[in-house]
Amino acid sequence: MKNETTPRLIVSDLDGTLLGRDHRLHADTIDVLRTLVRQGHQLVLASGRHYADMRVFRDELDVPIHMISSNGAYTHDPSDRLLAAHHVAPEQARALIDLPRPANVRLSLYLDDAWLIDAAKPSYLDMHASTGFVYDVVPPERMPTEGIGKVLYGGSPEALAEIETLIREIAGDALHVTYSTSDSLEIMAANVNKGVALSALLERLKVAPEACLAFGDNLNDVEMLSLVGEAHFMQNAHPEMAVRLNAARQIGHHGDAAVAVLLRERFGLPAPI
């Protein structure tokens, strides 16, 4: 579709989708998104990352952007105003903190303004190198149970599968359980996910889901991609995405700035110089 004048809302995941292999924005991605905002389209970033970890990308783009963070636990407007926050209930948080797990599985908490982890794991900082967002090490017995947007377990897929089974047996539908990568099991309060958060934001902005384009790569994007009129998942996406999203379109690899390539084609923008 070329030279469309109807304003659209464009929402994208970050890691594995909008960001490159180096977890940074490609120059072409920046150019495309700035151009579309100048043309009257709206942008939303929706990530499993903490809000403080996402602001760097918004500031680099230097355009108005709403942000859905911690897989839908928080929504902020372009001026940093908190629009919604959903926390894991304290008793559920305590059960998750105390859950038995192998010694090599790390436990993290995303609070309103902090990231806590039960033991140092330097590799966790690789994807946050460009944002400066770092964790504080806190033993599980001293971890708080109030104000937690997301609980995260990091470890091997096999270990996480066992933890996931245990959580589902204990909590049932009282928690939302998903993955952002194969080695990152993430838990939020019931009915907290990117899709629910985006739906509430669309209602606030008076935008129909059919007027949205969305991009994602992993299981924590399924609800969001199922909501919108034009859904896209990446070549590097989780294998189940094609099964769960029959109406979605597969595009190129995040390492090749495939979101920018698709948007240039979709909106008839000139090729980069």
Image (cartoon, grey):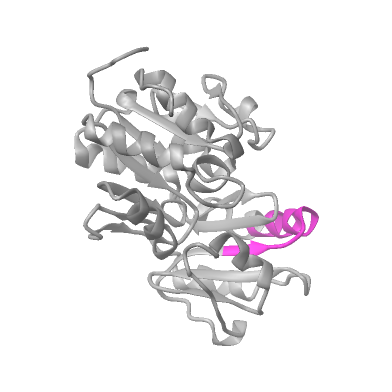
Tell me if residue 184 comes above or below residue 99 in the rendering.
Answer: above
State the image coordinates of residue 78 (x, y, percent, origin top left): 24, 52
User: Quick check: 256 above or below 166?
Assistant: above
Q: Quadrant of residue 198?
A: top left
Our reading of the magenta stretch's main secondary structure is helix
Q: Is residue 238 above or below residue 145?
A: above
Asked whether 236 or 197 is in front, the reply is: 236
Residue at 71% x, 60% y: name it.
163
Quarter occupied by the C terminus: top left
Q: Which residues are magenta?
A: 152-167
Which is nearer the eye, 165 or 161? 161
Q: State left or right for residue 195 relative to residue 186.
A: left
| Quadrant in which the N terminus is drawn | top left
On screen, residue 113 versus residue 42, left or right, reads right
Question: Horizontal and vertical percent for residue 105?
Answer: 73, 68
Q: Residue at x 40, y 53 (%)?
A: 57
In this rendered view, identify the residue nearer to me: 174 or 83.
83
- Give the residue at x 41% y 24%: 264
Q: Is residue 58 visible?
A: yes
Left or right of 123, for residue 45:
left
Query: Residue reaching furthest top?
Result: 1
The part of the image, by quadrant, that contains residue 154 is bottom right
Instruction: Please provide percent x and percent y for residue 26.
Output: 49, 43
- Whether 192 is among the magenta residues is no
Q: Is residue 73 visible?
A: no
Residue 156 among magenta residues: yes
Residue 79's place in the image compared with 229, above or below, is below
Q: Which residue is at 55% across, 65% downward? A: 129
Count of residue discs: 0
Identity of the residue furthest to the front in this view: 273
Pick the front one: 223 or 236:
236
